[in-house]
Image (cartoon, grey):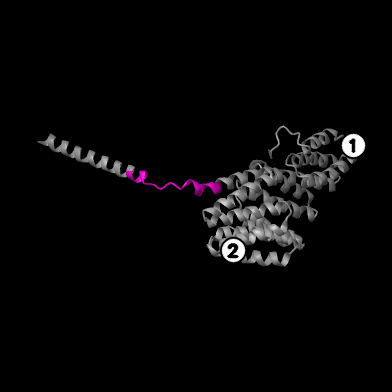
C-alpha cells in the first residue's frame, strides 16, 4: 500500500514537470520575432557606423541614407530620427554645417514629438556643436541650457552637453569655466566609453594648449589617442597625433613634432582626407627642415595612397 502511494505521488510529480515543460515550450513557440524589414534599417545604421569609425564618410553617409529610406518606408519614427541625426553628424564632420543643421533640426522635431528624450538631448547636443563651429555662440549656449533642463528632468547623462559647453567656453576664452565643466564631464565618463572619453580628453588638450600648459596638453591628447586607438576611430587618431605634433612644434621640439605629423598624415592619406593631408604636409615639411630629417619615404607613401595605390585602403 505504501509503495502504491509513493508511486502515485511520483506519477503526479512527473505529470506536473511535463506540463510545466510543455507550457514553457508553448510560450517559446509563440514568441513574436521582429519582421525582417523592421531590422533592415538598423543593419544599415551599424554598417554606416562602422565606416564612420574608419573615417570613410562618403561610405558611411550612403548607409545612413539607406537606413533613412528603410525606416521611412516602414514608418519607424525613432529610426528616422536616428538616421537624420547620423546624417547630420556626417555633414558636420565633412564641414557642411548648413546641411548638418537641417538634419539635426528634423531629428530634434521627431524625437520631441515622440517624447524620446534621450535621442532629443543627443540631437540637441550635436546641433549645439555645429553652432559652436559656426561661431553662433549665443544660440549654442541657449540650446545647451535647454537640453540640460530636459536631461536633468529625465535623468539623462549630460557629459556630451558638458563637453560642448566646455568648447563654447574655450571659444569665449572663459578658460576657468571650461576647465571646470570639462573635468566634471571627464569624471562622469567611464574610461571604457572610448568615444566619449577621447572626445573630452581632446577638448581638455585644446584648452591646455590654448592656455600654454603644454605638458598637460600632451597628456590629454595622448589619453585621447589611446581611447581612439581602442575604438578604432581613424580620424580621431589622426587628429590627436596632429595636435600632439602642433604642441611639440610650439615647444620647438621639432623632431618629436615631425614624428607625430608623419604618423598623422599617413592616416589622413589612407582615409582620403586631402584637405588635412595638405594642412599637415605644410607642418611636417617645416618641422622636418628644422630637425634636419628626411621625410621622402613618408611623402612617397602619402602620394601613392592618395592616388589609390594602397593595398589595404580602409575605405574600400
Could you tell me how many numbered marks the image carries? 2
Q: Residues within 10 Å of mark 1 (few under 14, many from 20)?
A: few
Residue 29 shown in magenta? yes
Q: Is residue 297 above or below residue 276?
A: above
Q: Is residue 184 above or below residue 276?
A: below
Residue 286 position by quadrant: top right
Residue at the outermost front position: 73
Left or right placement of residue 90 versus residue 111 in this view = right
Find disc 2 in the rendering and name its residue: 109
Residue 121 position by quadrant: bottom right
- In the image, the segment drawn in magenta is 26-42
Q: Which mark is residue 292?
A: 1
Task: Please tell me which of labels 2 and 1 falls first in the chain.
Answer: 2
Residue 128 shown in magenta? no
The x and y percentages for residue 220 are: 72, 48
Q: CA distance from mark 2 to mark 1?
A: 56 Å
Amino acid at each position: 500500500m505504501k509503495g502504491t502511494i509513493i508511486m502515485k505521488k511520483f506519477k503526479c510529480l512527473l505529470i506536473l514537470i511535463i506540463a510545466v515543460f510543455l507550457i514553457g515550450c508553448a510560450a517559446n513557440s509563440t514568441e513574436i520575432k521582429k519582421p525582417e524589414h523592421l531590422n533592415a534599417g538598423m543593419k544599415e545604421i551599424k554598417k554606416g557606423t562602422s565606416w564612420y569609425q574608419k573615417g570613410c564618410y562618403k561610405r558611411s553617409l550612403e548607409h545612413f541614407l539607406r537606413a533613412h529610406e528603410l525606416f521611412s518606408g516602414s514608418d519607424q519614427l525613432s529610426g528616422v530620427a536616428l538616421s537624420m541625426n547620423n546624417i547630420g553628424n556626417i555633414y558636420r564632420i565633412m564641414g557642411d554645417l548648413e546641411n548638418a543643421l537641417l538634419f539635426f533640426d528634423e531629428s530634434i522635431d521627431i524625437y520631441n514629438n515622440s517624447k524620446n528624450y534621450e535621442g532629443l538631448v543627443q540631437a540637441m547636443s550635436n546641433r549645439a556643436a555645429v553652432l559652436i563651429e559656426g561661431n553662433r555662440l549665443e544660440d549654442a549656449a541657449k540650446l545647451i541650457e535647454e537640453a540640460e533642463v530636459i536631461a536633468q528632468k529625465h535623468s539623462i547623462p549630460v557629459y556630451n552637453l558638458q563637453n560642448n559647453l566646455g568648447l563654447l567656453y574655450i571659444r569665449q576664452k572663459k578658460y576657468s569655466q571650461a576647465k571646470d565643466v570639462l573635468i566634471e564631464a571627464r569624471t562622469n565618463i567611464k574610461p571604457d566609453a572610448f568615444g566619449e572619453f577621447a572626445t573630452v580628453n581632446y577638448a581638455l588638450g585644446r584648452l591646455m594648449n590654448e592656455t600654454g600648459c603644454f605638458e598637460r596638453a600632451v597628456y590629454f591628447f595622448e589619453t585621447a589617442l589611446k581611447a581612439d586607438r581602442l575604438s578604432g576611430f581613424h580620424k580621431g587618431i589622426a587628429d590627436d597625433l596632429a595636435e600632439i605634433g602642433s604642441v611639440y612644434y610650439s615647444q620647438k621640439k621639432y623632431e618629436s613634432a615631425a614624428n607625430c605629423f608623419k604618423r598623422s598624415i599617413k592616416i589622413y592619406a589612407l582615409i582620403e582626407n586631402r584637405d588635412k593631408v595638405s594642412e599637415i604636409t605644410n607642418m611636417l615639411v617645416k618641422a622636418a627642415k628644422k630637425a634636419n630629417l628626411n621625410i621622402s619615404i613618408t611623402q612617397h607613401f602619402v602620394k601613392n595612397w592618395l592616388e589609390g595605390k594602397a593595398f589595404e585602403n580602409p575605405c574600400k
